[in-house]
Image: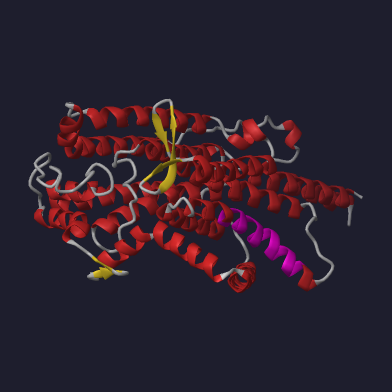
Amino acid sequence: MSDIGSEAKIEQLIASHPSHGLENRPPRKIVQRTNLPLFIMLIIVLCIGLIILYSVSSPIGYAEEADSLFYVKKQLRFTAIGLGLALFLNFVDPIKLLFKRYLMLCLASGGLALVLAAVTLVAGRQYNGARRWFMIAGFQFQPSELIKVLLVVSFAAYRQYIIDIRKKGKLKAKSKRGQIFMDTMFDFIVPIMGAVVVDILILAEPHGSCAMIIAGVIAICALTSGINHRSWLIGIGIMLGVAVIFGASAYAIMPEETFTKVEEKVMGNFSHVFKRLAIFNQDETVGDKTLTKDDTRQIDNAHYALGSGGLWGVGLGESRSKYNYISEAQNDYIYSVFVEETGFVGGMFLIIVYMIFLAMCMSVIWHARNVYYRVVASGCTAIVFIEAFLNIAVELQITPSTGVTLPFVSYGGSAQIFLLVAVGFILGCSRYGSYLSSEEPEEDLAAESAETAETSQVAEGVTE
């Protein structure tokens, strides 16, 4: 090639890549912004929830505490605490500013979840045969609400850690079969088994609805973390096989008297679950007992409240069911009372509000920068909206009663605080871990640097 042709090609390469020589270009400032539309939507949902709570709980608060605003005032305090934590998580990213390493964050959050579940099972405050609570400075704290969020963060940090060390050339086996087994072990069995251990401890409290929610949330985290389908199939097969072998061995070794006691203990702990299933299936008996009208009163009255609302409802604040026809109307069955007051239109309005909120959270998941942020955002979104779905499904009699409250609407201290913490993590993911949080994504900068280096090499080759 002639010298003239070489110089022409070099000039053409440089002209086609104006970014040649990043050292001569001033660095671009990373802009991290709070997701204002999502935050505003959260405030709207909280305001709607407080209005509904006041409308439903005012007669109960006046009857119990001579203050129609009693439950609203307490909910406002819980909301203020939760919003403070949510804003903290919006501005302070745990992995960037606190733990620095994904493995440390995984061990810290997962270890705390395990300790909380174990301590609650052993030393938690017992109520109606279940150990689920602690009393801290007069405040009834339910650790399972915090455990949900901790497990999501732990799972996300673990998956990102595994991906990072695999990029460094580690976790490689000598054979293809060995590699498949190693991938299944580290990608699926280890994180799922960690969550299963915590879930079993919560189930033993007993707290079946929380265990069910955690199972659903972890399943969504696993689905969004990019685990290979082969690892799913092999991992599920191995875990089921181990469970069957362990169960059969325990049954064969355990004396009959001990087995009978264990069976009676399980049946006693979950008698309320069997009763709820019998009520949902409209069975007249559960075990050797006959269901009474008192057993089905709550479900029946909630159903009547839904039907009596009609299209437009009886008027906000005019419900009759909240006058002790539905027990604890401010908790599990608040949606039924709200539909009685606002009708089909009001019920659909609230569902649409949740759907808009869900769409905004899904946008954060879609634009997540890496696996950690995607799993955190998807897991925290799942916590909020699985609970919303279960509550509304129960009140519409689509599923059996679960005891799950309606997020940001039902009264509850621990639930309100840690649901807001979950949204705080979503806001943080949008601020720190989203492609939209900067003028230019980190991956694009890396690609541009690689492209520039390649251009330089080509130019040098042409010159030679």
Among the 4 quarters of the image, the one containing residue 301:
bottom left
Residue 370 visible? The answer is: no
What colour scheme does the image use?
A: secondary structure
Q: Nearer the viewer, residue 216 or 46?
A: 216
The residue depicted at 78 percent of the width and 46 percent of the height is 453
The residue depicted at 30 percent of the width and 61 percent of the height is 276
* Identity of the residue furthest to the right in this view: 464
Instruction: Residue 102 in the image: state x and y as whole percent.
Output: 67, 43
Decide whether residue 66 is among the magenta residues. Answer: no
Q: For the stretch drawn in magenta, what is the main secondary structure? A: helix
Judge from the rendering whether residue 461 lies leftward or rightward of residue 312; answer left or right.
right
Q: Quadrant of the N terminus?
A: bottom right
Instruction: Residue 369 in the image: state x and y as whole percent.
Output: 58, 46
Instruction: Residue 15 in the image: state x and y as whole percent.
Output: 71, 44
The residue depicted at 17 percent of the width and 50 percent of the height is 339
| Total labels drawn | 0
Q: Is residue 3 above or below residue 216?
A: above
Judge from the rendering whether residue 79 lies leftward or rightward of residue 265; answer left or right.
left
Judge from the rendering whether residue 388 lies leftward or rightward of residue 439; answer left or right.
left
Judge from the rendering whether residue 427 lies leftward or rightward of residue 283; answer left or right.
right
Q: Nearer the viewer, residue 359 or 154?
A: 154
Q: Nearer the viewer, residue 312 or 6?
A: 312
Q: Which residues are magenta?
A: 179-196
Instruction: Residue 354 in the image: state x and y as whole percent.
Output: 32, 48
Residue 443 visible? The answer is: yes
